[in-house]
Image: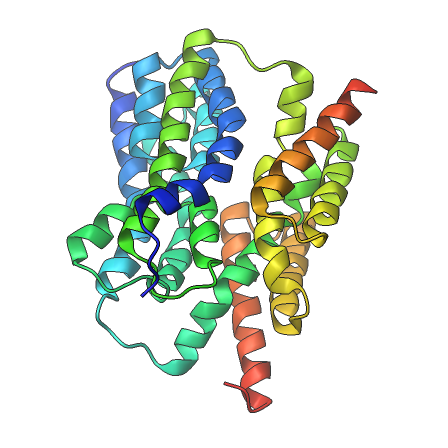
Amino acid sequence: MGSWIWWTILGMAIVTYIPRAIPLTFLEGRELPPAVQNVLRNIPFAVLGALIFPAIFFIQDNIWFGVIGAAAAFGIALTGANVMFVVLGSIAVLAVYSLFI
Amino acid sequence: MDHRGFSAGLKAGLSIAIGYFPIALTFGLLAKTTGLSIWEATAMSIFVFAGAAQYISLPLIAAGVAPVVIILNTFVVNIRHFLMAASLNEKMQPDARWKKALYAFGITDESFSVLAIQKEDNLRTSFAAGVITISYGSWVIFTAVGHLIGANLPQFLQAAMSIALYAMFVGLLMPSMRGNRKVFSLAAIAAALNSLFYFTGWLSTGWAILVSTLASAIIIELISSKGGRT
């Protein structure tokens, strides 16, 4: 790779950093209108929905990995287990499944 | 203010580090097969720290696509972090701008989710630093390791571990969702919209997550403020 790869990495770094940094620095010490604050407080739950679906089903070419993995994750999470247990439990279920196919 | 500091942050971020492990390892390996040196591959993880964008850049680099196109593409994929950073700002303790500019670098889908879902408000900067340090460390170190060993995990483990980050998202969401119709609706509407965009191909992934998240958050705010609960 030539020096252009380093310019590419630099450019990628800059355009990735800007959207991360602007809100946190510009909004510091500023009070937003209540309606905007409420929308921003809704974001975490909405973003989790969008991050999980539909991507969870497509973790492998074989769709069953996603389906079984999703069922395991939701099943374990429903018991009230903590996050680490949900993660390790889902991995264990899929490890067992993949040994059987 | 929430009392938890750096070491509690490290602990809260541990599931991210586990989830990043197979993805970073594979990224290092793919970067190697694309022709990037270990320095170039690791530098990308050090300076960009954005999984999806880094993955997408590899076939573009291999195809000899112009750097400016790769950079624009990266911007579009990562524009959703703008929304996350604005939301996170409501959750964090007020602090010096340079400190916030520093930890802003570490906002990813995963670190944002872990921080934003905490029950406590006014999270300390040191707590965020802990979550980000362990995530970033895992991402950078395992990128280098993946390039260095040039091999992947055993197939069954690789396949099984690909559920890790999604399982984490589920594990983060579920406790807030139980018995809370508003939280359930927020997640369900965003999931439905994002699925719609995915299957119709109307929007690329970066925009799809941004638009479906924002639309869901606004719709639910309109409904709940009309119901007299603001």
Q: Where residue A25 appears, x then y in whole percent?
A: 23, 59
- Extreme-front residue of the structure: B3
Q: Nearer the viewer, residue A57 or A95?
A: A95
The quarter holding residue B194 reads bottom right
Q: What residue lies at 28% left-to-right and 49% top-to-bottom?
A: B126
Q: Where residue B11 appears, x then y in whole percent?
A: 43, 41
- Height in image: B153 above or below B3? above
Q: What residue lies at 67% left-to-right and 62% top-to-bottom?
A: B188
Q: What residue lies at 51% left-to-right and 28% top-to-bottom?
A: B23
Q: How is the image coloured?
A: rainbow
- Height in image: B109 above or below B123? above
Q: Nearer the viewer, residue A57 or A87?
A: A87
Q: Where residue A51 appears, x then y in whole percent?
A: 57, 49
Horizontal side, residue B220 vs residue B90: left or right: right
Q: Nearer the viewer, residue B197 or B222?
A: B222
Q: Nearer the viewer, residue A78 or B71?
A: A78
The quarter holding residue A58 reads top right
- In the rendered picture of this protein, how many numbered marks are placed on residues? 0
Quadrant occupied by the N terminus of chain B: bottom left
The quarter holding residue B54 reads top left
